[in-house]
Amino acid sequence: MNDCLIFSGSANTALSASIAGYLEKDLGKMGRNRFSDGEISIAIEENVRGKDVFVVQSTSPPVNENLMELLIMIDAFRRASAERITAVIPYFGYARQDRKDKPRVPITAKLVANLLTASGVNRVITMDLHAPQIQGFFDIPVDHLFAAPVTTAYFQNKGISDLVVVAPDVGSVKMARAFAKKMRADLAIVDKRRDGPDEVEVVNLIGNVRNKTAILVDDLISTGGTIVEAVDVLKKNGAIAVYASCTHGVLCGDAIAKIKNAPLEELIITDTIPLPPEKKLPVIKVLSVAEMLGEAIKRIHLSSSVSSLFI
């Protein structure tokens, strides 16, 4: 692993340090400053010529700042003659805009893929894309990992009986089905209809949750509206306890207030996005995906198989 270098953007330095620790390496040295008008200035402070470089940066809030910083870092490594540049993007922002669902709107997931490729990246590692088909927007290799092995292991250790896994909306059914199969649990689906961009009206529940412990499974929680509405429906339909699990805890707007007041036993998120102190609640449990990402980096660097990490 001597020719493998790990660098961190400013979006999630704690996760980057944990990944480097798993690989028994120090983070690469890099200077980061700003011009007086706010422009980002990057300077690599060690030799990367001919090296296999991995840049860890989630495009989490502030999304545009972190995305621009990632592009600038990649350009710096390309111009410094790195042998290969891999962008490790635990949370891929703009993934929710993956198609034209109405006239005259952009497909920003494709735009971001184009920007990354144009900046000079050779490979991308990411986790639980909002839409898996976004992999096809890239003309370079994409390793799409899943946090399910980490979260299912956590729930299996709890030894919960009479368990049902619930998809909070139709879009998360595939993810919930895989989760339920791993947990050997039943599956239920919350059918909902959106009245507006940030409002959710729950319509129906498909499946039986009465006298069972429910786990809501989704890829991300943004404003918290979908999850909180789903919790209320499950409680009204007889669930004795409700847990929620998501990979990316975006938790913007009044999400924390909603979660705080919801009858949730626990909300499980991962550290793909850092959880600031002001958003920490006793009900929120953060699991780390550093080991999984570190193992993916090791296997890619050594040209060995990473397929077992996709399970």
Image: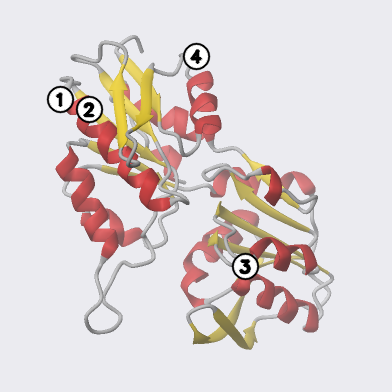
The numbered dot on residue 79 is 1
Q: Residue at x 20, y 33 (%)?
A: 75
- Mark 4 surroundings within 10 Å by alpha-carbon count, few (fewer than 14), some (14 through 19), many (20 or more): few
Write down the residue under mark 4: 24
The numbered dot on residue 76 is 2
| Amino acid found under the numbered disc labelled 4 | Glu
Q: Which of labels 3 and 4 is toward the front? A: 3
Percent position of residue 158, x then y: 78, 48
The kind of secondary structure element at disc 1 is: helix
Proximity of marks 1 and 2: CB atoms separated by less than 8 Å = yes
Q: Residue at x 75, y 44 (%)?
A: 157
> Residue 140 vs residue 220: left or right?
left
> Residue 82 vs residue 54: left or right?
left
- Mark 1 surroundings within 10 Å by alpha-carbon count, few (fewer than 14), some (14 through 19), many (20 or more): few
Q: Earlier in the sequence, mark 2 or mark 4?
A: 4
The kind of secondary structure element at disc 2 is: helix
Q: CA distance from mark 2 to mark 4?
A: 25 Å
> Is the residue 295 above or below the residue 168 in the image?
above
Proximity of marks 2 and 3: CB atoms separated by less than 8 Å = no
> Is the residue 64 above or below the residue 171 in the image?
above
Percent position of residue 208, x then y: 71, 80
Q: CA distance from mark 2 to mark 3?
A: 37 Å
Proximity of marks 2 and 4: CB atoms separated by less than 8 Å = no
Q: Which of labels 2 and 4 is toward the front? A: 2
